[in-house]
């Protein structure tokens, strides 16, 4: 098959995926989205003869728009643009999880600092304020006092970009110093890792220590429900332990897997390519 890979920078994740595809004899078309022009009627020449497209764009804005164009050209794209749109927006992500009955932290969205303060006071301290669009734990704040809340809300209200005027406020979940990332393909868990840190943010991108973790039946069932809620695809589902159970705090659509591959017994890129091959075969059968 000919796999188109959308990118703006080739990271180690993409190198692992590209290497696996080429080792299996698949043709790879690397598509640098910074250099392409996407017409509303005609696809760029780079997409000719491509069987499936994998979105590995670093920027959320590019990911959301380019997948829409690829889908409009009638080319299967991983992930689907609606899945990308849901996962890229924390408010939409929380909404669909809640609507599907997936346990997720209590969350409120407000549009003025006055109403945001009311939500924060009701949640109590600490609570968490997040940007609706963002990754790697950037611009997230654990709010420990009213003074801190007032200062952060004022900063956000004056930042200018409209997304900073959407206040996404969430309860603070007391997790045991770690959270869990599960990579999944259409709800089927590939592998999982725990990400531990002394900091309240436990992203691997922020230096958290990672280790492989066994996927329990409860985790697998929860991951499948979360995947279904956002539309399926190649996803990273983030769980937090809450006593003897779990809560899903977000689902990621352009999931990074290099850290997981380093600690897992599972060959993550190989499993992803297995799934891509099956996906293309399924598309061909139903066409």
Image: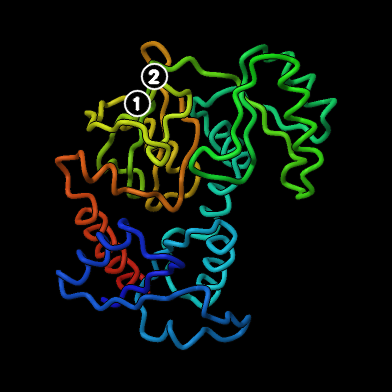
Location of residue 131 in the rendering, given as x and y in whole percent from the top left corner: 64, 39
Is the image coloured rainbow, by chain, by secondary structure, or in one colour?
rainbow
**Depth order, front residue of 53/71:** 53
Q: Looking at the image, tell me whether mark 2 or mark 1 is earlier in sequence order.
A: 2
Q: What's the CA distance linking mark 2 and mark 1?
A: 6 Å
Residue 107 to residue 160: above or below: above
Identity of the residue drawn at 24% across and 55% down? 269
Q: Nearer the viewer, residue 163 or 74?
A: 163
Q: Is residue 172 left or right of residue 261?
A: right
Q: Which residue is mark 2?
A: 177
Point out the image quarter for the C terminus. bottom left
Residue 264: which disc? none
| Mark 2 nearby-residue class (10 Å; few <14, some 14–19, many ≥20) | some
Say which quarter of the image contains residue 280: bottom left
**Rendering coords of residue 118 (x, y %):** 79, 19
The residue beneath circle 1 is 196
């Amino acid at each position: 098959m000919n796999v188109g890979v959308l990118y703006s920078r080739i990271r180690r994740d993409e190198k692992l995926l590209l290497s696996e595809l080429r080792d299996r004899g698949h043709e790879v078309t690397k598509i640098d989205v910074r250099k392409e022009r996407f017409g509303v009627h005609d696809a760029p020449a780079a997409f000719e003869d491509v069987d499936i497209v994998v979105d590995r764009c670093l920027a959320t804005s590019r990911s959301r728009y380019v997948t829409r164009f690829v889908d409009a050209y009638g080319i299967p794209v991983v992930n689907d643009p609606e899945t990308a749109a849901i996962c890229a927006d924390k408010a939409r992500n929380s909404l669909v999880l809640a609507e599907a009955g997936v346990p997720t932290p209590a969350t409120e969205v407000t549009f003025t600092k006055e109403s945001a303060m009311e939500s924060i006071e009701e949640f109590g301290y600490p609570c968490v304020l997040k940007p609706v669009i963002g990754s790697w734990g950037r611009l997230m704040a654990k709010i420990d006092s009213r003074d801190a809340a007032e200062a952060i809300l004022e900063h956000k209200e004056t930042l200018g970009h409209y997304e900073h005027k959407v206040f996404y406020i969430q309860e603070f979940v007391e997790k045991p110093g770690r959270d869990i990332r599960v990579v999944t393909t259409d709800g089927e868990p590939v592998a999982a890792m725990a990400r531990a840190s002394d900091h309240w943010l436990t992203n691997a991108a922020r230096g958290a220590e990672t280790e492989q973790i066994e996927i329990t039946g409860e985790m697998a069932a929860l991951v499948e429900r979360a995947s279904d809620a956002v539309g399926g695809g190649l996803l990273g589902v983030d769980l937090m332990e809450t006593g003897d159970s779990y809560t899903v705090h977000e689902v990621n659509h352009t999931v990074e897997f290099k850290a997981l591959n380093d600690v897992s017994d599972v060959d993550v890129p190989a499993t992803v390519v297995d799934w891509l091959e099956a996906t293309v075969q399924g598309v061909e059968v139903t066409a």
